Image (cartoon, rainbow, N blue to C red):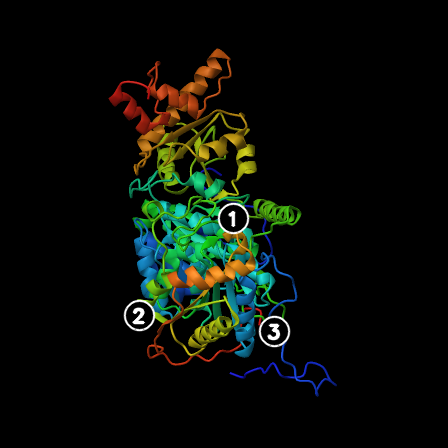
Amino acid sequence: MTLRTPATPATPGASAARLIYRKPDVLLDRSTHYCPGCGHGIVHRLLAEVMTELDLPPHTIAVAPVGCAVFAYDYLNVDFVEAPHGRAPAVATGIRRVRPEAFVLTYQGDGDLAAIGTAEIVHAAARGERITAIFVNNGIYGMTGGQMAPTTLLGQRTTSSPNGRDAALMGYPIRITEMLAQLPGVTYAARGTVADVASIGKLKAMIRRACQVQIDGGGFAIVEALSNCPVGWGMTPQESLQHLKGPVVAEYPLGVIVDRKAPGAAPVPLQPATGPEA
Amino acid sequence: MTGQREIGIAPRHAGAEAVPQAQARANAGAEADAHRRARVLMKGNEAIAEAAIQAGCDAYFGYPITPQAELLEWMARRMIELGRVFVQAESELGAINMALGAAATGARVMVSSSSPGISLMAEAMSYMAGSGTPMVLVNVMRAGPGLGGIGPSQSDYFQATKGHGHGDYRVPVLAPASIGEAMELMATSFELAERYRTPVMVVADGILGQAMEPVDLRFRTPERRAFDWALTGAVGRPARVIKSIDLDPEVLEKRNLALQHKYREIARHEVRWEGWQLQDAEFAIVAYGTAARVASSAIAEARERGIRVGLFRPITLWPFPEHELARLSRHLDGILTVELSSGQMVEDVRLAVEGRCPVAFHGRMGGLVPTPHEVLGALKALRARVDRTRETGHRERVESRGAFSRGHGSDGDGDGAGIHASVHAGERHGGRR
């Protein structure tokens, strides 16, 4: 894999200047539909950086979820297919099986992955599908107006738990990444957050590792990105980040949960995918 | 010419060379590729699976359910043998969404299930119709509703033709009446799916799935098309997106209008049906699949008794051969629709006939199949009714709903028209429900 260095001068004559910030080309030049302060934009950006660094965009077939990231293909310039709500891991399985040479990526929220799509994510992980799953957990259904998700904290008020999540009535938050990490088919599982700059750096390293696992022929790889939902949480962006660092991280501990070596699989070199029209 | 089957196929696009089963049989002698032609005894589910494989199916995704499990099992063995893709999914939801993903990359994909599983697959069918993703889906129908039973049934006609999932969409529905025809229609269904970028459904019933029949091992592999929409990695071209969502109502209406245009094209070019003994017919039985096989036996018996009756067998349930049936109905004294259901296709028959002649219905449910004798009884009853109407000079419309009431009801003529099973229930319980 060739690393594309962001320090490459973008324009002739600018060679004397050292470029320290450059938007990855795969990230389209559009303003997003995300609410002010939302963490999705950061995760998109990290993903775009990692994909660019690993030269993945031409090989990528990505699966968009239903939820806030439903329009992910408007921001990431790679081939995309829309999945029904929760079914992204099954859709990705289909792609993986007929396109062994492609880089297969799913991007899901917590309603999509941890509620309606639990069967699909568990079995894709159990089969050890060689896909990279990005899981953005903001503990709420943002797109539909801030309803309770399986990941909502106890006591948290949402539009469908107006008095706060009550364990007796609504059960407990799901740590689904830990659940998935139990499965031998999961090569890599980690949880990071967009809460501050240092965490964002660590999250990027996790995303990079989850992509590298697929490149190296490993099994299922998942990165959970704890994120904020200022509008859904009824907070300012600053307050939401403090909340994220406090009670949210306390419920969902950060770090690498499992990093198994690829189970004997020979690395599968990435090649430009060939289609019927190629 | 009485006794000879005619097959109706509307003119289609150039390049389509679907050979109707009956015609194919007639041409059999001229076939050169003898090595692909042998007559063997095959189980329906397995024959359908092998025909799909020979039609170039790249990937199959399934979940076990009776009465189509042998189809999945055949695929499990053969697809792996051939180095192709077979995945037993965690559910029908998983299976069809895997198919969605694989199809989005341009692969030739297939799923199969039986009624309750098709209900679960309905969600993705809607997405695939909306996003223009080709796929072939086989429904080996069993009796419902709910978990129902595993006997043969045609009670998913509404589901297949009027919509499985949500939204304004249709899918072509092909209904074979024999295992040989089912094999031929597998190739046709892949062609239709790829030509029109749509899911295509093949509906069989438990009998077609489970029975064994001698079949010609004659296969056809539709030509591969170049897809300018397939997701293959954005190399040297802009990125592609396969989706059904559009939050702008103007844009979404345009998308819908394009879909409806496609459906009109399909309705114009892809109607398939078969007629038998219709030339001099005064009556016609309209039936598809296994019901048409039973009807054929009843027609042979009826002809011996001097009743001039023929068979009109829709092969595409959608698009329904409505114009063909409408034309035919002008020359008929009456139509009997026979189904393994409470009467679903009969609604389309009535819509096509538009009251030009009486339309009666006979059906069985729960996994039971009407006997030729029953069908003959229903036919005689229809004829008697038409005769009575003539005598009184009073044009009375005989419709299945009317016949249904009589089956339970006061005049107690027990004429056999109506829902046989309901008549039984009526007798047992002594009256109307």
Q: Residue B145 appears in which quarter of the rendering?
A: top left
Instruction: Find disc 3 in the rendering and name its residue.
Output: A24
Camera-near label (2 vs 1) is 1
Name the one closer to the observer, B52 or A21: A21
Instruction: Find disc 2 in the rendering and name its residue.
Output: A184
Q: Residue A151 appears in which quarter of the rendering?
A: bottom left
Q: Secondary structure at mark 2?
A: loop
Instruction: Find disc 1 in the rendering and name its residue.
Output: A144
Q: CA distance from mark 2 to mark 3?
A: 34 Å
Q: CA distance from mark 3 to mark 1?
A: 30 Å
Given the image, what chain letter belongs to the residue carrying mark 2? A
How many residues crowd mark 1 within 10 Å: few (<14), some (14–19), many (20+)? few
**Is residue A180 in view from this perspective?**
yes
Q: Earlier in the sequence, mark 2 or mark 3?
A: 3
Name the amino acid, label 3.
Pro
Q: Report if the CB atoms under discs 2 and 1 are less than 8 Å apart.
A: no
Given the image, what chain letter belongs to the residue carrying mark 3? A
In the displayed orientation, state which residue is furthest to the top.
B392
Name the one closer to the observer, B226 or B122: B122
Name the amino acid, label 1.
Thr
Check the image and report above or below for A249 versus B186.
below
Name the amino acid, label 2.
Pro
Q: Residue at x 38, y 46 (%)?
A: B204
Given the image, what chain letter belongs to the residue carrying mark 1? A
Q: Earlier in the sequence, mark 3 or mark 1?
A: 3
